[in-house]
């Protein structure tokens, strides 16, 4: 087989055989096919796409490129959730302990911030002592002890995805539904989950900005997972505005604790309870999504989810007592209020602009080698539909220095839209739920 023939075939819009897909995946991992040829193939896939059969084979080959974590049969079941990324999206930090407190084990392999979207691992790293680089033995131990474990992707877990994603990031081929599907599912299969729930974002702050693209990605994830023997649910959620009030690594940890204490913002908790309901239903712990949402609310109300969260912090090397002392006080040295220049109703908060404004502060990364800061970000005082008067505080910017604070504040001010009349606000962030057939 020849990689040039495979590139040419996909360039011309033809279907690749299972053998050809296996050849280029294995060849890239073992180094026999160079970056520049895989880059050409990725661009051909980006423009020409793949049919479902090709996506399934690509996903399977990526899974088989490395080691799969072996989870014990008991305790179980194992259910995980994956988000396609957003601004202020700290759902995983709230969701995992809720579901774990209800008897479902959550093996969660997460990622880091890149571009305007936040990363779960960076948020957790802002907790002093907390380690997200768990060995397989520690991952299984923590999972068995508190019901959920949070870790990053190691070099021997799906190496094909690790290599290809780095290449996609620098070749403008990230936004490809076949490649996104194979990337997400290969990691999720490798961590050993029995069932999967996908939070597919749509709107200005999402990678899939249009509803049509988000629906196509959700359908591809659910279909491919089913073809490979996994139960999968997808929930399409609106990411036009930041989720919750906090944007920034420790700020989002703090808001997650508030959520688990029963004081979370309505929008954030709606998404969390909806995803929890799917996970509980997939695990057989709830007979319906309605019952699943009620169980999720109970786990917050009775304190069991918060206890589970702090237990996980301790098991993964953090100090719950120190974390509690940091709440409300751990902030970057410069704080700058952003105030309204006129009166009106909050008609929009551009999630993409807020995400981009956070990158220079250190909330996120422009490239994978950039360092993030745990103490910077934005704390909003308003959300959609709120009434403000001129001079009212819209949010506070936390930054390492005055210059970066002022630059971010100017961008935030431009991202907040004020209307003279009360706007019509979407009643729910849940756009669509796709359940397994």
Image: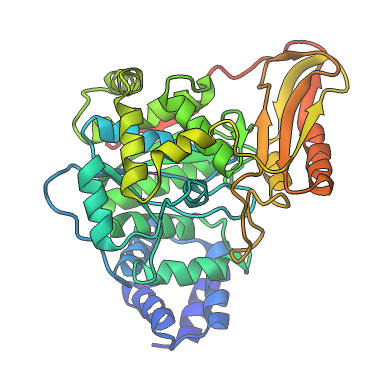
Could you say which quadrant of the image residue 2 lies in? bottom left
Query: Residue 287: image x %, image y %?
Result: 21, 23
Q: Position of residue 350 (x, y in %)?
A: 71, 34
Vertically, is 207 above or below 53? above
> In the picture shown, does residue 167 fall above or below 420?
below
Q: Which image quadrant for residue 35?
A: bottom right
Q: Is residue 129 left or right of residue 331?
A: left
Query: 106 or 377: nearer the eye?
Result: 377
x then y, percent, for residue 60: 31, 64
Task: Please say if 50 is above or below 390.
Answer: below
Q: Nearer the viewer, residue 294 or 150?
A: 150
Q: How is the image coloured?
A: rainbow
Residue at the spot x=46%, y=30% of the render? 257
Q: Is residue 71 left or right of residue 412?
A: left
Tell me where residue 146 sits by quadrant.
top left
Q: Position of residue 173 (x, y in %)?
A: 58, 63
Report the residue at 41% width, 58% height from top.
152
* Between 140 and 194, the one nearer to me in the picture: 140
Tell me, yes or no, if residue 279 can be seen here. Answer: no
Which residue is located at x 41 percent, y 49 percent? 220
Q: Is residue 58 above or below residue 406?
A: below
């Amino acid at each position: 087989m020849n990689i040039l023939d495979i590139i040419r075939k996909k360039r011309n819009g033809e279907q690749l055989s299972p053998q050809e897909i296996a050849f280029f995946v294995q060849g890239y991992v073992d180094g026999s096919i160079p970056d520049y040829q895989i880059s050409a193939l990725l661009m051909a896939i980006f423009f020409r796409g793949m049919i479902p059969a090709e996506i399934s084979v690509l996903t399977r080959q990526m899974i088989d490129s490395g080691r799969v974590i072996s989870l014990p049969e008991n305790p179980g079941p194992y259910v995980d959730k994956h988000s396609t990324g957003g601004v202020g999206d700290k759902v995983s930090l709230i969701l995992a302990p809720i579901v774990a407190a209800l008897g479902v084990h959550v093996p969660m392999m997460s990622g880091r911030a890149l571009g305007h979207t936040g990363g779960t691992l960076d948020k957790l790293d802002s907790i002093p002592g907390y380690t997200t680089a768990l060995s397989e033995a520690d991952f299984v131990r923590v999972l068995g002890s508190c019901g959920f474990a949070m870790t990053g992707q190691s070099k021997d877990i799906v190496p094909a995805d690790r290599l290809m994603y780095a290449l996609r990031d620098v070749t403008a081929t990230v936004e490809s539904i076949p490649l996104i599907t194979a990337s997400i599912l290969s990691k999720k299969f490798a961590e050993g989950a029995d069932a999967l729930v996908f939070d597919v974002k749509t709107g200005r702050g999402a990678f899939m900005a249009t509803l049509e693209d988000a629906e196509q990605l959700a359908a591809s994830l659910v279909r491919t997972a089913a073809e490979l023997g996994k139960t999968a649910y997808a929930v399409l959620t609106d990411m036009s505005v930041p989720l919750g009030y906090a944007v920034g690594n420790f700020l989002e940890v703090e808001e997650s604790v508030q959520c688990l204490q029963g004081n979370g913002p309505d929008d954030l908790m709606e998404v969390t309870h909806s995803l929890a309901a799917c996970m509980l239903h997939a695990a057989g712990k709830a007979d319906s999504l309605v019952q699943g949402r009620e169980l999720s609310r109970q786990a917050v109300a009775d304190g069991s989810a918060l206890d589970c969260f702090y237990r996980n912090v301790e098991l993964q090397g953090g100090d719950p007592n120190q974390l509690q002392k940091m709440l409300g006080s751990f902030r970057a040295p410069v704080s700058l209020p952003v105030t309204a220049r006129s009166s009106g109703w909050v008609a929009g908060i551009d999630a993409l602009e807020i995400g981009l404004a956070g990158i220079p502060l250190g909330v996120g990364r422009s490239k994978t080698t950039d360092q993030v800061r745990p103490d910077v970000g934005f704390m909003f005082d308003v959300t959609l539909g709120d009434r403000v008067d001129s001079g009212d505080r819209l949010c506070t910017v936390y930054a390492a220095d005055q210059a970066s604070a002022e630059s971010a504040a100017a961008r935030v001010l431009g991202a907040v839209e004020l209307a003279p009349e009360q706007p019509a606000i979407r009643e729910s962030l849940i756009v669509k739920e796709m359940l397994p057939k």
